[in-house]
Structures are given as structure tokens and as C-alpha cells.
Amino acid sequence: MLRIMAATDDGQCREDVPLERLTDDDVNWFWVDFDCPKPGEIDLLDSYFQFHPLAIEDCLQRLQRPKVDHYEETHFFVLHALHPQTLKAEEVNVFLGPRGIVTFHLAPTQEIEEAWRRMLDPDFRRGRDHNYVAYLLMDKLVDNYFPTLYKIEDQLNEIEDQGENRVDLQRMTEQIYDIRGELLRIRRTVLPMRDLLYRLLNSDKIPGVKEQHAYFTDIYDHLLKLTEMIESNREMTADLRDSYDSLRSNRMNSIMKTLTVMTTIFMPLTFIAGVYGMNFVNMPELEWQAGYYIVLGVMLALGLGMYVWFKNKGWFD
């Protein structure tokens, strides 16, 4: 789907404007959004807008790392949106030119829908142009990273609280490894986005960035905070993992110690039973009238004596 927004000299902002009108003198700036475009619409990137072939190739090849490339008067951005459930990165491509902005994405993107509605609001749009649209898109994308990280923090706090109650350590360990995988996927998006904003703030190639330096600095600060949250959560998962591994090792050691003590107690009993289980003819004890009860008594006394001895030494604690 191809949709077009154009702001004119009279302060109006019209939707569904024909492409041919974008070059009219009364059009101050425009926004063209390629939302899940069809093959015929994709061809317009080259036939109408005449964007650089390498930029068009990056649009069609998924998944590119967040970056910014400069082509004469057009600046090409690769941005990432995070799916809140799957944490899958969806690519959002932005062409920023001197008179307008073009967005291209192969999947529906909530952040673009929000920015589109905001720019249609006359009160919000007043005094803002396509350069502000680029800022608004980046701001929306970055702001939507936070709920995912807040959710992960809540999960980690819940796991930590459950760990105090000694719940299933195996299940908790699996959850921790799953969360570390989620943090790694988010990190692969946040760090390149942070580097991209750093390049923008230290570049003079895009005039709109210089004019709105404070706004883009705010996005960069958010990305720094996101980076700190990711690293903090990764450290927390590492600490929880080590704690649970220690608990599991201690539990296993306790089990092995108990089994070893029980085996030690039964070793002499097994020896006695083995001796009197031999089929030699010349074994006088076999003919004793009370021999069976004597052997059982000796075995019982020996077992209880070893148990009391190990108990006093604290081997069952």
C-alpha cells in the first residue's frame, strides 16, 4: 500500500495526494509511506524517486544492521522496530531528502502508524516539517523498546523472589537462559541504533539534525539508558544463573552424601549376608538353633550403631 501526506503553503496537510503533485510549488514537504508495498509500488523507488540502487537493494534485503548512508542530497536510514511478543526486529527504511521523507517497510509497523496520526493533527504539526518526522519515527521506535525491557525486569524480579522459596531450580534455570537470549536479541538492535544516533549527532551532513540537535540528543540518551538496562539485566541473569547452579550443586552434593552414607551402612550388612549365603558344607553356624536370629541382631545393631555414629558427626545435616 502506498500512502502520501503533503503539507502545503496554506498550512493544510492532505492525504492521498497524487505523486505528480509532490513537485508543485505550493507543497512545503511531503511524506510517502510504502506500507507492505506491491512489486509495482516498489519500482517507484527507482523510476520516480530515483534513489540510489544500493539503498534500494538494502530495502529489499532483510535484515540490515541499523545504519545511515549519505547519497548526494538523500540520506538513507535503516532502523529497527521490535515486535513486543516475539522480539523479532522489523526493518524500517527511511529516505530523508531536502523536501520530503519516504518510509519503506515490508511489515505493518505500529510506530509509523502513531507518527502518521500525530502529523495529521494540525495543532501538533504546526511549525514542524519532514525532518521532524524523521525524529518522531526514531523516537517512537526507541520508546517502544522500553516496555519489553521493563517486562524482562519484572520476570527477573519474580524469578529472584521464587528462588528464595526454593522452587523448581531446573525450570528457573531454563527461564534465565531464555531471558538471556531475549536480552541478546534486544542488544543486537539497541547497540547499532545507539551508534547510529551517535553518528548523527556528530555529523554535519544532515541540516535537519543540527536544527533539532536537542531532540536527537534525547533519543541518544534513551538509547544509553536502554544499553545500561540491558547490561544490568544481563549481569543479573548471570548472578541468578550462578546462584541456581550453586544451589543445584549443593543439593546434588547433599543427595550424594546421603546416598554414600546409606551405602556405607549397608556395606557390612551386605558382607555378612554374602558370607552366610555361601554354600559351603562345613559352616558350623548354620546348624545353630538361634543362628538366624543372632545374625539378624548383629546386623541390626551394626546398622543402628553406624547410623548413630554418622548422625553425631553431622553427615546427615
Image (cartoon, rainbow, N blue to C red):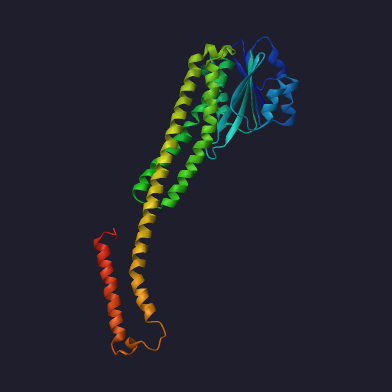
Q: Position of residue 242 (x, y in %)?
A: 41, 44
Question: In the image, is 42 to the left or to the right of 68?
Answer: right
Q: Which residue is located at x 37 percent, y 50 percent? A: 247
Q: Quadrant of the C terminus?
A: bottom left
Q: Which residue is located at x 45 percent, y 37 percent? A: 234
Q: Which residue is located at x 42 percent, y 44 percent? A: 241
Height in image: 239 above or below 21? below
Q: Quadrant of the N terminus?
A: top right
Q: In this view of the protein, which residue sits in the foreground, 216 or 119?
A: 216
Height in image: 210 above or below 103? above
Q: In this view of the protein, which residue sits in the foreground, 216 or 292?
A: 292
Quadrant of residue 133 within the rendered picture: top right
Q: Is residue 1 visible?
A: no
Q: How many numbered tags mark residues here?
A: 0
Question: In the image, is 130 to the left or to the right of 168?
Answer: right
Q: Position of residue 69 (x, y in %)?
A: 63, 20
Q: Which residue is located at x 55 percent, y 27 percent? A: 192
Quadrant of residue 125 within the rendered picture: top right
Q: In this view of the protein, which residue sits in the foreground, 207 or 315?
A: 315
Q: In this view of the protein, which residue sits in the foreground, 196 or 253?
A: 253
